Image: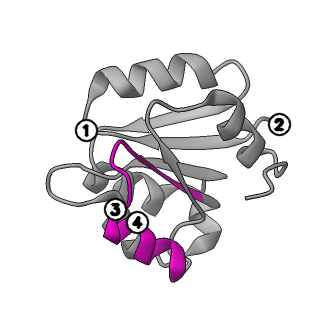
Amino acid sequence: MPLHLLLVDDEAINLLGLKAILRRDYEVTTAISAREALAILARQRVDAVISDQKMPGMLGTELFAACQDRQKTGIRIILSGYDNDQAINQALASQIIDYSLGKPIRTAKLQAILHGRDQR
């Protein structure tokens, strides 16, 4: 059974692009906002959540902080086009998120993380 991923981004074009790449190997659910992601996570468990950081209403790091149940979210990956984001660094240090990846996304790096082959 393939891993179930939840992709979260307020820009639909980013969701569509990433989903097109990942759906070959994974079951993919998408959310256009952190609020929608929280509603999805209230109903189902996923193996990984991959979220954009900068979204209106709630940052990606705030989304992960709101998800207390690690069993529902699995691997937590934040995506950001900004270097040295203080909120991301803080979330990594406090283990609210597991990984931070820059944009544009390197698919091989993401797949290594999802399959436990990343050495950090």
Of the two numbered discs 3 and 1 on the same chain, state the one appearing first in sequence: 1
Determine whether label 4 and label 3 are within 8 Å by CB. Answer: yes
Q: Which residue is mark 3?
A: 85
User: Which element is circle 4 on?
Assistant: helix
Q: Amino acid at mark 1?
A: Asp
What is the number of the mark on residue 1? Answer: 2
**Region of the chain picked out in magenta, as a range:** 76-93
Mark 4 and mark 3: span between their CA atoms? 5 Å
Q: Which residue is mark 1?
A: 10
Q: Amino acid at mark 3?
A: Asp
User: At x 82% / y 52%, what residue is drawn?
Assistant: 116
Residue 88 numbered tag? 4
Kindly identify the residue that appears in the image at 57 percent across and 32 percent down: 28
In the displayed structure, 16 sits above or below 99; it is above
The disc labelled 4 sits on which kind of residue?
Answer: Ile
**In magenta segment, residue 5:** no
10 Å neighbourhood of mark 1: few (<14), some, or many (≥20)? some
User: Could you tell me if the residues under marks 4 and 2 are in contact, i.e. CB atoms within 8 Å?
Assistant: no
Out of 110 and 120, give the one closest to the viewer: 120
Residue 117's disc is none
Q: Nearer the viewer, mark 4 or mark 3?
A: 3
Q: Secondary structure at mark 2?
A: loop
Q: CA distance from mark 1 to mark 2?
A: 28 Å
Gap in angstroms between the C-alphas marked 3 and 1 = 18 Å
